[in-house]
């Protein structure tokens, strides 16, 4: 069942989303060569606690993952697409590509978002894949308007990614969000336009393109969570919380990548 939010509820969700955006930006700055993903986990846990929130991920289980997720942060490096488990053994190195996915619940409502950043100088291919994923996200958000069909968003993601010569992840999807972390509807990253429910004011969804270089099914490691590309090629992941409103799409998380760039010098971070 799709649950529409009131303006009062949207205000709380937007407040949460801004807090989450700021934490993800701080984590992105902290993610440098020589830092471990375990250090990022402890910083994320501290910031969530200071915000008066509770982790959405730690202890999470569902029908696909019977083993509780052990961390507050998903830190996925290079070929790890999603659900990378932070560790003091995982040291970030120059040229790595790091996806950070974080969620919490506060004042009865969930927030969930993700960003991918390069560690130091990364390959041109990695830069291009990240730019394509961000472009796909922007195009998809533009379709989050009253009267559109849900799959218009999905089609915008897939068409943008495929035109650039990459592939979307099909095993994991975006989702509705509110008083539950994962609400209806599922927001696929692929499919034809014009299908699914009609978008209405008050719908809040997480749009999250996951992009990779091969069209093979993902592989889940023995930890039961970390999903990786079968070929070992890199993958990237971005996620924003978006509300459908009479005024158009409202990005509750406020474009995390652009906020990350705004806080850096233009020479260090080009907004694409």
Image: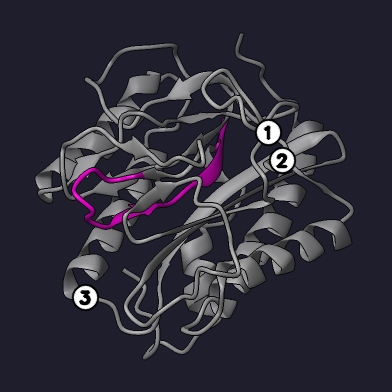
When the figure is inspected, residue 68 is found, relative to residue 94, above or below; the finding is above
Please tell me whether residue 15 is drawn above or below residue 110 in the rendered image.
below
Between 27 and 19, the one nearer to me in the picture: 27
Query: Is residue 96 left or right of 109 when viewed as pictured?
Result: left
Please name the residue shown 16% across and 37% down the image: 215
Chain part drawn in magenta: 228-247
The quarter of the picture where residue 167 lies is top left
Choose mark 1 or mark 3, whichever is in front: 1
The residue identified by callout 1 is 60
Label 3, on which residue?
123
Residue 85 or residue 100, whichever sits in front: 85
Quarter where residue 182 is shown: top right
The spot of residue 186 in percent (x, y) is: 47, 21
Magenta span has 202? Answer: no
Q: Residue at x 24, y 48 (%)?
A: 212
Which of the marked residues, 1 or 3, is nearer the chain's N terminus?
Answer: 1
**Residue that numbered label 2 is attached to:** 56
């Amino acid at each position: 069942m799709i649950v529409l939010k009131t303006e009062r509820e949207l205000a709380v969700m937007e407040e949460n989303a801004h807090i989450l955006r700021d934490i993800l930006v701080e984590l992105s700055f902290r993610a440098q060569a020589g830092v471990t993903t375990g250090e990022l986990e402890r910083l994320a846990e501290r910031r969530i606690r200071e915000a008066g929130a509770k982790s959405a991920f730690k202890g999470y289980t569902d029908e696909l993952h019977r083993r509780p997720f052990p961390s507050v942060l998903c830190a996925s490096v290079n070929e790890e697409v999603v659900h990378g488990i932070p560790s003091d053994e995982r040291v970030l190195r120059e040229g790595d590509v790091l996806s950070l996915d974080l969620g919490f619940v506060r004042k009865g409502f969930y927030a969930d978002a993700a960003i991918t950043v390069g560690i130091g100088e990364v390959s041109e291919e990695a830069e291009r894949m990240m730019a394509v994923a961000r472009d796909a996200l922007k195009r998809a958000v533009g379709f989050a308007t009253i009267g559109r069909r849900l799959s218009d968003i999905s089609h915008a993601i897939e068409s943008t990614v495929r035109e650039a010569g990459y592939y979307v992840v099909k095993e994991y999807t975006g989702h509705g969000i509110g008083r539950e972390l994962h609400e209806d509807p599922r927001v696929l990253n692929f499919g034809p336009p014009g299908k699914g429910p009609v978008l209405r004011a008050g719908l809040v969804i997480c749009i999250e393109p996951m992009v990779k270089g091969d069209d093979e099914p993902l592989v889940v490691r023995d930890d039961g969570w970390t999903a990786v590309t079968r070929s070992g090629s890199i993958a990237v992941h971005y996620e924003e919380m978006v509300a459908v409103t009479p005024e158009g799409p409202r990005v509750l998380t406020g474009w995390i990548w652009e906020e990350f760039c705004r806080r850096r010098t233009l020479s260090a971070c080009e907004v694409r």
